[in-house]
């Protein structure tokens, strides 16, 4: 029963019960017994009023007490409890809202803890990734200063190593900058219509030149119609492709590696595949390869190096394009990165042909009149 109904029922009972009982007592009692009956009715009336007041008090105070205790727990940072209320009255909706608020606060607190943990891990990873090449640079510079590089060959080797390490630092800082800008939506995307076939032909030509120098064979298959169009930012999309290829090169453990690029037609969607013949990814690692700083190697001092955020950038760019990216892999055989994007289809509005069609003679007459007017204006200007 709703609280509002309880209060109304109690009010009506308190107001009408004395009137009805006193009326009946006067109607059906004698003068000798009237006084005693009235005293008994007064006592009964007070008792009923007291019971009703206790009933209303408990209906109001009980739920308020529960809410007060829940509020104190939240104030003290305790969100591990459940607030339940079985009655279908005004407090029921209030308890439901309060419980939803508690659940959301708990989820926000847990999310904050997770983000803080990720940030601490990110700082640790960045520190390690920056420290490794910096230590190497410092060591080789000290070697040069101490005269260890006492021959032109050694000096040249030391300088080349220092240059390589500074390049690694610059690349790492660039990837971190891009990732942070993508994460905070600070990179402006310049979306435009691109022809998928022509765009990928250019990308494959660029990829082929780089991979063939490393002994990796590239194959390209396109099953899409020539006029297939998608909405994308060419520069950022190219960055995603570059990161995929770079990651494949990094984990290519075969002398004669291969990279197969396929474009497939799936109705309203475009399915892209980048398949390499690298060492593959273990099943336990596959769900996490797009997490930032995740590496399949247990040791961070792996020979492959890298920042560990290349695939994270790929995922961010893909999601910004409204697409989806995932991976399949078999250890010892290779990995395939899959993309799925929606095609762009122009909506052509049909116009009423009768309203657009105009007699050719009239249209020609108007053009002739305009030309004559222009000639007359030019002649008048010359005469002036």
Image: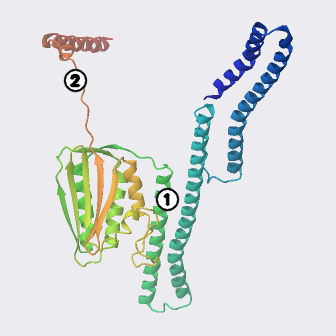
Q: How many marks?
A: 2
Is tag 2's residue or tag 1's residue first in the polypeptide sequence? 1
Tag 1 secondary structure: helix
Residue 199, visible in the rendered structure? no
Q: Secondary structure at mark 2?
A: loop
Q: Where residue 1 appears, x then y in whole percent?
A: 60, 29
Q: Is residue 68 left or right of residue 109?
A: right
Q: How is the image coloured?
A: rainbow
Towards the viewer: 358 or 197: 197
Q: Which residue is mark 1?
A: 177
Residue at image position (62%, 52%) is 81
Query: Where 123 falls versus 12 (above or below)?
Result: below
Going 78% across and 23% down the picture, which residue do you hit? 44
Q: Residue at x 61, y 41 (%)?
A: 98
- Image location (x, y in percent) of residue 110: 57, 56
The residue singled out by tag 2 in the image is 350
State the CA–CA distance, disc 2 to disc 1. 47 Å
* Label 2 CA crowd tier, 10 Å (few <14, some 14–19, many 20+): few
| Front position among marks 2 and 1 | 2
Whether residue 360 is visible to the viewer of this picture, yes or no, is yes
- Residue 84 location, quadrant: top right
Is 295 left or right of 53, judged from the image as shown? left
Q: Is residue 242 above or below residue 135?
A: above
Q: Is residue 321 left or right of residue 332?
A: right
In-image side of 34 versus 208 (left or right): right
Image: 118 above or below 181: below
Residue lying at 34% horizontally and 61% vertically, measured from the top left: 242
Residue 59, quarter of the rendered image: top right
């Amino acid at each position: 029963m709703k609280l509002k109904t309880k209060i109304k029922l109690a009010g009506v009972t308190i107001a009408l019960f004395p009137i009805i009982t006193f009326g009946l007592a006067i109607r059906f009692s004698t003068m000798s017994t009237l006084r005693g009956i009235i005293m008994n009715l007064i006592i009964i009336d007070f008792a009923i009023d007291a019971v009703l007041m206790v009933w209303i008090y408990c209906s109001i105070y009980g739920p308020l007490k529960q809410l007060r205790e829940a509020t104190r727990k939240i104030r003290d940072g305790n969100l591990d409890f459940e607030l339940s209320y079985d009655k279908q009255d005004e407090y029921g909706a209030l308890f439901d809202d309060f419980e939803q608020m508690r659940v959301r606060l708990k989820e926000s607190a847990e999310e904050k803890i997770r983000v803080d943990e990720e940030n601490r891990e990110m700082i640790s990873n960045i520190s390690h990734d920056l420290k490794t090449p910096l230590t190497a640079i410092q060591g080789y510079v000290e070697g040069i200063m101490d005269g260890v590089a006492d021959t032109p060959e050694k000096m040249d080797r030391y300088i080349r190593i220092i240059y390589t390490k500074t390049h690694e630092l610059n690349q790492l800082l660039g990837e971190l900058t891009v990732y942070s800008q993508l994460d905070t939506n600070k990179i402006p995307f310049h979306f435009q219509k691109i022809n998928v076939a022509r765009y990928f032909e250019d990308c494959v030509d660029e990829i082929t030149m780089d991979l063939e120098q490393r002994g990796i064979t590239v194959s390209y298959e396109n099953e899409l119609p020539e006029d297939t169009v998608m909405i994308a930012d060419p520069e950022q999309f190219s960055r995603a492709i570059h990161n995929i290829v770079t990651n494949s090169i990094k984990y290519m453990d075969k002398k004669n590696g291969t990279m197969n690029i396929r474009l497939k037609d799936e109705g309203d969607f475009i399915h892209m595949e980048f398949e390499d013949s690298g060492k593959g990814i273990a099943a336990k690692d596959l769900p996490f390869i797009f997490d930032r700083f995740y590496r399949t190697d247990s040791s961070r001092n792996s020979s492959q190096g890298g920042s560990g955020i290349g695939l994270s950038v790929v995922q961010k760019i893909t999601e910004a394009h409204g697409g989806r990216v995932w991976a399949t892999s078999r250890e010892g055989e290779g990995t395939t990165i899959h993309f799925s994007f929606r095609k762009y289809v122009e909506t052509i509005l049909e116009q009423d042909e009768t309203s657009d069609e105009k007699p050719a003679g009239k249209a020609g007459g108007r053009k002739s009149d305009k030309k004559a007017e222009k000639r007359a204006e030019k002649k008048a200007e010359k005469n002036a």
